[in-house]
Image (tube, coloured by chain):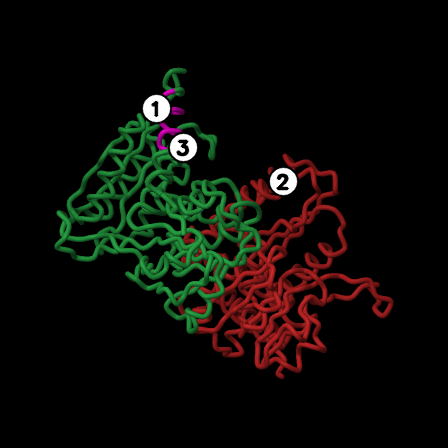
Chain colours: A green, B red
Amino acid sequence: MRLIDGKAVAAQIKQEIAEEVALIKDAGGKTPHLAAVLVGHDGGSETYVSSKVRTCEELGFKSTLIRYEEDVTEEELLACVNRLNDDADIDGFIVQLPLPKHISEEKITDAIDYRKDVDGFHPVNVGRMSLGMSCFLSATPAGIVELLKRYKIETKGRHCVVLGRSNIVGKPVSMLMMQKGYPGDCTVTVCHSRTENIKEICLQADIIIAALGVPGFLKGDMVKEGAVVIDVGTTRVPSNKTKSGFKLTGDVMFDEVAPKCAWITPVPGGVGPMTIVSLMKNTLLAGKKEIYSK
Amino acid sequence: MRLIDGKAVAAQIKQEIAEEVALIKDAGGKTPHLAAVLVGHDGGSETYVSSKVRTCEELGFKSTLIRYEEDVTEEELLACVNRLNDDADIDGFIVQLPLPKHISEEKITDAIDYRKDVDGFHPVNVGRMSLGMSCFLSATPAGIVELLKRYKIETKGRHCVVLGRSNIVGKPVSMLMMQKGYPGDCTVTVCHSRTENIKEICLQADIIIAALGVPGFLKGDMVKEGAVVIDVGTTRVPSNKTKSGFKLTGDVMFDEVAPKCAWITPVPGGVGPMTIVSLMKNTLLAGKKEIYSK
């Protein structure tokens, strides 16, 4: 069993990005600028956003954090999105999800100019990805694919089983894994809560991407020898062993599954660190106007 | 074995649409208006477009056919698309594919206002479909799903194997079949030219949607007893038994496969007739501004 070290790969990519940003700045080019909108004080969202802002600083990006209280109205938030759409200095921005219930996430996501949608959640980017066109790839699927690439894991003709059909991981990663070319060309099966014989299907998988959000779902007896296992789960489970009072827990029963794997990602330190890096990559592309020219 | 009679279902839906159009007209509402752009004289395209125009007449729609010769420039075609985008009387339009090689299909499709994209090929509609939002569903996948619905074929928890990963059938129908709700909630496997053990996978399928465009690909020994088989193949194979000199041939070896099936679509008379009907349904929705309000 070999570990896919997402932390190390993320560090490597960060260095690549930082070097490129330094070159851009030296040449008098525009500093990539990411804005993040954070509503309320959800613990997870606070952590993600501050980590994004910190990473911007590390890489030499400019960043702007815009905060709203829980009681912000949908109109106020839409007005903010429109301001960011129109602000020529801002290359890309994200509105951290989830949003409070009185605000439609669909409406907000839809209002973001897709040319600044570095989260890759806008229908235009989702559609272009599905069609195999250039686009802002959503961060987690992009991070998964990048890990496979950096570790030169063969995908062509392999059976990839995706656990979960969410809009932000399951569906897009299944599209990427079936795409023509590398990494891709997989036979892809998508399983979810309605799947009846999930164990049997997992046992056929050469690659399993577990994104159900159910801690410890994938057990040792569900994985065949030599499989590649990517654990996307990041459920916060209460713990008295950590300072924060919780620990991030994956969808994979690591101790049971790892010994059977050719490759496996740990949690934390696997897919997680790649997600932020993918966002930074999108922001760099946005700054360079590489995906959309205007 | 029972036959899924696409022709009969299509006739039924056409009648429903015609009745609704008559009511709309009686109430002084707008007559749905579909425009079709046809470039060159490809036999298949001529047949499809004239059949679309004829169906418009049958249903009481207004239709406009715009023809260009093979040597039309991309600029001319884009200008035409823009005129149709701006024409308030036209509710929806299609540019019949394939286009000559000197014209980028991607550019043309992208230029169509997604609110008039009744083919459902524009990235916004593809993305919204994938996200489970209201949209113009592309015609063939919509037709397949409608057939399953009209025949009340159970899909929840069933293993649906999709053969083919094309942008117009394989990928979108896989998204629809895994969607929450009915018809959907399937475990979905997408196979394609790179799949290694396609027979083994097909034998596990409760539902097979064959959209490879390879005549007679699915043989009797690849299908389990009681499966539902949807044949999307419509390859024109030369024949001296028909007036036209060819016959439409499906991806399924019907004689071998049908006896094992619970349900099966024939070719012709299965998915084919549903495709045009789906386009008409989208045009009706466009006329009523039901998907996009402006």
Residues indicated by labels 2 and 3 sit on the same polypeptide chain: no
**Cα–Cα gap, marks 2 and 1:** 34 Å
The type of residue carrying mark 1 is Thr
Give the residues drawn in magenta, as a range.
Answer: A13-22
Q: Amino acid at mark 3?
A: Ala
Mark 1 crowd level (few <14, some 14–19, many ≥20, 10 Å Cα): many
Instruction: State the residue position of label 2.
Output: B104
Q: Nearer the viewer, mark 2 or mark 1?
A: 1
Question: Mark 3: few, some, or many residues within 10 Å (few <14, many ≥20)?
Answer: many
Is residue B29 visible in the rendered structure shown here? no
- Badge 2, how many Cα within 10 Å: few under 14, some, many 20+? few
From the top left corner, tell me how far across and down residue B67 is, in percent. Answer: 70, 47
**Which label number is shown at residue A159?**
none
Place residue A116 in its image quadrant.
top left
> Residue beneath label 1, please?
A31
Which residue position is annotated with label 3?
A: A286
Element type where label 3 sits in the image = helix
